[in-house]
Structure formats: structure tokens, C-alpha cells
């Protein structure tokens, strides 16, 4: 895996886990559940940003910054959009069409429980990502080590019995040259 791919994977993981846990903690703390479309959109928008923040090597400080940035951005977008939940389907009877509208409620007042829930979500996200990467690396190392120890049955080499010097296969070039006649066309006959 290249450094760029690893950084992108770390960023995508940080953005995804941080956003999902922020949405969950927001709901557990008594806020409305965010619209799934908002969650998906924020993950997509935050992945490149988080990828830039986490950097090419594992760093707890950079990972913490990416998690904090992802959670703050998600919470800010949720509040700025008026807590869209996507629960309500609104039918427009005047035009005989039905459309899905985001249920926009007034942003709830921030409470101590909400801040505590987000803090717990941030700590949990950081622990999951930091330890998770180390666990995945350990599993990969052990898997490679086991695969290296596995004996692969090899085909038995043919036993040469009574081979002579002339029976040894020749290189391709010599086989081609030996099949080509070096003799030219017949000489013209004089009458």
C-alpha cells in the first residue's frame, strides 16, 4: 500500500467513524437523529480534509485533530441547517406529487449532556481508530508470518535416468538455427 493510499484510508476511517459516532452521541444526548443523507454528505466532504490532517504516518495528535475537526464540522453543519432529520414525507396535494422534505426543527439549545456526549464520542472514536489500526497491522503481520511458514507441496523433479550429453535440451536459438538449412539454391547447370 502506498503512502498516499494509507493516508486516504486513515482519513476516510477518521471521517466515517467520527461522523457516525457524533451523530449517534447527538441522538443519545437527546437531540434529533440526523438525516442519513447529511451523514453521508459530511463523510464524503470530510474524508479529503481528514486525509490531509492525519498525514502519512500514524500520529495520535494528528488523528485526534482529524477526529475533532470531523465532529465539530458535522455538528456545525447539523446546527446551521436547522437539525435536518429527514423523517417527514410531505405530500404536495396541489400538484398531486409527493416529495421528501427534510424535517427542519429549530436547533436545540446546547446542554451539558450534549457536550459530554460529544466528548465521549470523540474519545471513543480516537480509541477505536488508534487501537484499531494497530490491531489490523498486528493481524496482517501474523497472517503473513503464518503464510510464510506454510509448506507448499512442490512437484517432484523428474529423475534423469540414463541421460546422455546429446539428450540435454538445447536453447531455443540453437534449435531454430539447426532447423534452417544453410545450403543455398542449386547451382545452375550448364548445358
Image (cartoon, rainbow, N blue to C red):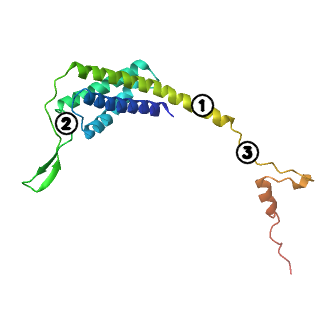
- Looking at the image, residue 124 sits to the left or right of residue 3; the answer is left
Q: How far apart are marks 2 and 1 (CA)?
A: 45 Å
Residue 14, can we see it?
yes
Q: In which quarter of the image is residue 18?
A: top left
Q: How crowded is mark 3: few (under 14 residues within 10 Å), some or many (20 or more)?
A: few
Residue depicted at x 83% and y 51%: 158
Q: How far apart are marks 2 and 3 (CA)?
A: 61 Å
Residue depicted at x 76% and y 48%: 155
Above or below 41: residue 107: above
- Looking at the image, residue 190 sits to the left or right of residue 38; the answer is right
Q: Quadrant of residue 62?
A: top left
Label 3 sits on residue: 153
Give the total of numbered labels.
3
Label 2 sits on residue: 84
For the C terminus, give its image quadrant: bottom right
User: In the image, residue 81 lies at what x, y percent?
Assistant: 18, 33
Q: Which residue lies furthest to the left in this view?
A: 94
Q: What element carries label 1?
A: helix
Q: Are marks 1 and 3 in contact (CB under 8 Å)?
A: no
Label 1 sits on residue: 142
Q: Residue 99 carries which label?
A: none
Q: What element carries label 3?
A: loop
Q: Earlier in the sequence, mark 2 or mark 1?
A: 2
Above or below 183: residue 171: above
Q: Residues within 10 Å of mark 2 (few under 14, many from 20)?
A: many
Residue depicted at x 82% and y 75%: 188
Q: Which of marks 1 and 3 is nearer the N terminus?
A: 1
Amino acid at each position: 500500500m502506498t503512502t498516499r493510499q494509507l493516508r486516504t484510508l486513515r482519513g476516510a476511517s477518521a471521517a466515517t467513524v467520527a461522523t457516525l459516532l457524533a451523530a449517534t452521541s447527538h441522538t443519545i444526548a437527546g437531540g434529533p437523529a440526523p438525516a442519513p443523507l447529511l451523514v453521508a454528505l459530511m463523510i464524503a466532504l470530510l474524508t479529503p480534509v481528514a486525509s490531509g490532517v492525519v498525514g502519512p504516518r500514524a500520529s495520535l495528535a494528528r488523528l485526534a485533530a482529524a477526529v475533532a475537526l470531523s465532529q465539530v464540522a458535522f455538528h456545525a453543519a447539523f446546527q446551521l441547517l436547522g437539525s435536518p432529520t429527514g423523517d417527514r414525507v410531505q405530500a404536495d396535494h396541489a400538484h398531486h406529487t409527493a416529495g421528501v422534505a427534510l424535517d427542519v426543527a429549530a436547533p436545540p439549545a446546547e446542554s451539558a449532556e450534549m457536550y459530554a456526549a460529544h466528548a465521549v464520542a470523540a474519545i471513543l472514536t480516537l480509541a477505536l481508530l488508534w487501537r484499531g489500526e494497530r490491531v489490523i497491522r498486528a493481524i496482517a503481520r501474523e497472517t503473513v508470518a503464518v503464510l510464510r511458514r506454510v509448506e507448499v507441496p512442490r512437484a517432484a523433479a523428474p529423475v534423469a535416468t540414463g541421460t546422455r550429453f546429446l539428450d540435454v535440451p538445447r536453447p531455443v536459438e540453437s534449435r531454430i538455427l539447426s532447423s534452417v538449412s544453410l545450403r543455398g539454391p542449386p547451382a545452375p547447370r550448364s548445358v
